[in-house]
Amino acid sequence: MPEEKSYETRSVKKLETTKLVGQYQKEWFMSLHSRVASGEPFAYVQANAPMEILRAMDIPYVVNQWWTAICSAKQMGPRFYDLLAEAGYRNDICSYCSMGYAFSLDPRPEEGPWGGLPHPSIVIGSETCSSGMKIEELMCEAFRADFFRIQHRHQDVFLDNWWEKSCDQWETLIGKTRLDFYEMELRLLIEFLEKKTGRVLDLNRLIETLNNVNRQEGWYRKTRDLIAATIPTPVTVTDTINSVMQAQWHRGSKWAADMAKNLYDEVRDLADRGVAAVPNEKIRLLWIGRGLWFNLAFYQYFEEKYGAVFVWTMYLALAADGYIRNNFEDNPVRAVASRFSFLEDILHVPPFNSQWFVKEAKNNSIDGVVFLVPENCMNNGDFYYNIVWSLEDAGFPVCVLRADPADAKKWTQENMVAEVENLIEDRILKKKERQQMQGENE
Amino acid sequence: MAERNCALQSTAYRHLRSAFQEKHKAAAALLKEGKKGVWMLGDEVPEEIILAAGMVPVRLWGKSGDRPHADTYLEASFGAVWRGYFESLVSEETSRLIDHLVLSNSSDIIQKLYYYLLQLKKIEPERHLPVPTYVDYWLANRDFRSQERNWKETEKFLNQMETWANRRISDKDLSEAIGLCNEHKGALRQLSSLRYGKKSKITGSEALTIVGGSFYLDKKEAAKLIRSLVQEAQEWPETQAVRCFYTGSLQDTPEVYLLMEEGGLNVVSEDKIFGDRYMDMDTDPSLSPLMAVSRRYHYRFPGSERSFTSDRAESLPRRAEETGAEGIVVFMNKNDESYIWDLPRQKKELDKLGIKVLVIENQKYPLDDKPGLLERFKAFAEEVKRGRDHA
Ligand code: SF4
Ligand code: SF4
C-alpha cells in the first residue's frame, strides 16, 4: 500500500504534453506485458546504457532509474526496500540503484506500479561502483536473465566547456583511446544481442534512430533556451520534469521526438502569451541532483511564500546539451559510444560538471542553487566542494541538502524546507536588497 | 592481547615494526641519494615496472589523526580509509615528498580521487600536488577482452614509467624486478603459512605490521628480515584464539586486529593488501615479463570492490576454509559498506562449511565505541567456541 504522507507530495501537471506522455507511458507498460508474454525479449538497463541500439533492434527495455522514479512516485519504495531487508540486505543504502533488484524479489510483482514489471530476459550492466555492479548481477540472477556487462574506462581528456564540442567535435572531446574502447564494447553488445534475440541490428534503423534522437534533443534545446530567456518563466521544473524524463526513456523513437516538439510548442505558446507559471516570480532557483520523485511538490513549496521558482533541473538541460551528435553517418556506433561514455561524466566528473552548472546558472538568470547530495550512496562523489566553490565564486549562493532521493521514509520535510528557506532569506533576499540599495544610491 | 613479547624481542620484527610505525622516516631513507619515488594508491599498481625503471615504489599511507582537508574537500560518502589517503596527499607534511603518484582502478572511489586531484591542482595551483597517472585495469571479469585490455594497460603504464624515469626499460630490467618482488612475496608467504590452521604462530596484528613494514624497506632487505623472522617464529607459542578470516574496510594500522585479539579472535588471513592479498601469487617468471605482470594483478584473489557476488561467494569461503578460519569478520567503515551486497550469498556457502560470520557496520574513524566493539568480538569468539564444543 502506498504510504500516507503528512505533506503534499503530488505536483500540479498543467501541460498537455505531460498528460499525453503519462498516458502513453501507462499504455506502453501495459503493452509490455503482452509483448513479453508473447515471447519477445525484454531488457533491463542502466540510465547511461546505449538505448539507441536496443531501440533500433526493437528490443523493449526499461531503465533502472526510470523504474525507480515510477515506484518512488507511486510511494512504493518502502515496500520494496523491506523486501531487501527480508532477503538479508540492508534497506537503508543504495535505494536509488536497488529498486529493480528489490522488485525482482517481490512474490507479488503484479501489485507493482501498472501491474508490475515483467521479468526481463536481458540485463545490461554498466554500473561502475562496487555496490552497483553487484546489485546488477544479483538482479540479473533473480530475474533469470542473460547478463551483458559493459566495461568502463576512465576519461583522460579534460577539455573546457564540453557543451561547445559535444555535438560536432565529440571525437576530440572524448579522445581516441576511450572512444575506441567504448566502440568495441558496443560492438560486443550488438553481437550479444543479435545472438540472444535472433534479431539483427539494421544499420539504416540505427541511423534513423540517431536522427530521431537529434531531433528530439534539438527541441529540448530550444525549450531549455526559451525557459532560460523568459522571465517570469512560463513553466517550472515540476511542469516539465515528467514530460522530459518519460519521453527521454523512449529516446530515438518518432513518438519521443514528437513529444519533445509538443513540449516546445506548448512552452512557446505560454511564453508568447506572457503566461507566468508563478506570477509573482522573484527568485529563480536551480536544482542539482537526482529528481525528488516521491515529492515533486517540494519544488513548488517556495512559490507562494517567496515567489521562488525552480526553473532548472539537469533533466531538460542534459537533454539539451548532452545527447546531440552530428556527423555520425560514417560510424553511428562510435557516435553512440561517445554519448554513452560521457553522459555520467557530465554530472559527476570535474570540471565537466562544475563548468556546466555555472554556465547554466548564468544562462537561466539563477539567483540560488539547491544541491541535493544523496546520503545513502557510498559512491556519491562529484567533487561537490569544487561545484559549490565554482558556483559561489561565480556569484551563485548554494545550499546543500543531504537526503535520500528515492526513499520517502527518510525524508524530513521540515528540515529540508528550513534549509531552502535559509538560502532564500539569508542569502538571496539579502543580496537582492543590497543590490537594490546600491542601485538606488547610484 | 597486546603485542607479544616474543615478537618484540625479535630484532627482525622490531626492524619491520619501526619501518611500519615510522613510515615517513623509512620512506625518506628509501628515497635517499635522490632516488625518484613513485607513490602508489590502490592495490593494482604494478610496482615491478616502477622498480624496473630504477625508481622506488612507495605505498601511500593514510594520515591518522585529524583530517581537515578531507573534511573540507570530500563528500561524506568517502569512507575513513579514503579520507586518510586524501589527507596524506594534500597535507604539507607528506605532499612535499610526493612528486609522482599512480592510482589504480581498485575502487571507484580511487578513480574519483584521481579526478579530484586533477581538478584541485587547477583550482588551487599553489598546492604542491603530484601529477597523477591512472592504471585502469578491469578486474571483475577474466575473459579474453579483460586479459587483452589489462595487458595493453600494463604496456601503457610501462611507457609512462619510462617517461618519468627518462630511460628505457628492457625485458631484463623487468625480469629482475619481477624476481625481486617474487622474493619478497615468497618470504611473506612463508610468514603467512605460520598464521594458518590450528597451530597459528603469528598473530594477525603481527602479520599486518610485518607486511606493512616491509613495504617501506628495500625489497631485498625486507625479504631477508622476513625469512629470519620466520625462523624465529617457529619457536613462538601457538595462539589459542578463535581463528578468523578478515574482510571489509582496509586496515592499515593494527588497531582493529589488536582489539580483535583482545576479544579472543585472531586474524589468520585476509583479502587485503596489508596482508595475504598482497602476496597470494607470484608474477610468473616463465611468461613474457609484461604478460606476467598483467596477469599477476588480474588473477589474484578477487577483492570485493571489483568483483561480482558470485566470485566472492565462491572464493571467500574456500579461502577461509583453506586457511583454517573458524569465523569470518566483515568489518565495514561507514560508507564503505559495499560488502553488504556480497553477504547473503556468501553466508549460504559459509553455513555449509560451518563457518560463522560477524558483521560490523557503520564504523567511524577514529573508532568511537571501542568497548562496544570489544564486547562484540568477545561474544563472537564465545559463539564460535560453543560451536566447536558441539562439533
Ligand atoms: S553506492 Fe550509490 S551508485 Fe553505487 S549502487 Fe549504491 S546508490 Fe548506486
Ligand atoms: S605469547 Fe607467550 S611468549 Fe609470547 S609474549 Fe605472550 S606470554 Fe610471552
Image (cartoon, rainbow, N blue to C red):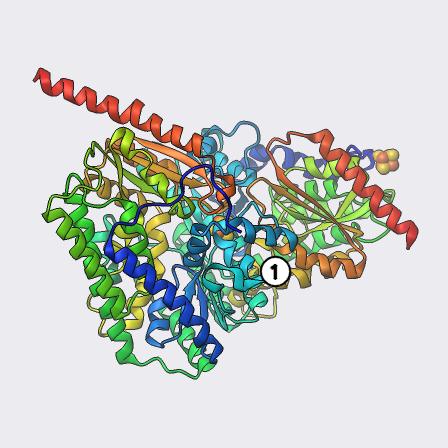
Percent across and percent down for residue A215 are 20, 65
Residue B231's place in the image compared with B175, above or below, is: above
Task: Provide the chain ID for the residue under circle 1.
Answer: B
Closest to the observer, A159 or B164: A159
- Left or right of A356 in this view: B83: right
Among the 4 quarters of the image, the one containing residue B295: bottom right
Quarter occupied by the C terminus of chain B: bottom right
Q: Is residue A243 visible?
A: yes
- Left or right of A392 in this view: B44: right
- Disc 1 crowd rating (10 Å Cα; few below 14, some 14-19, many 20+) is many
The outermost residue toward the left is A442
Percent across and percent down for residue A415 are 44, 30
- Left or right of A371 in this view: A355: left
Percent across and percent down for residue B375 are 77, 34
Among the 4 quarters of the image, the one containing residue A57: bottom left
Question: SS for tag 1?
Answer: helix
Give me the residue at 23% from left, 65% from top: A257
Quarter occupied by the N terminus of chain B: top right
Residue B166's place in the image compared with A416, above or below, is: below
- Total marks in image: 1
Q: Which residue is mark 1?
A: B309
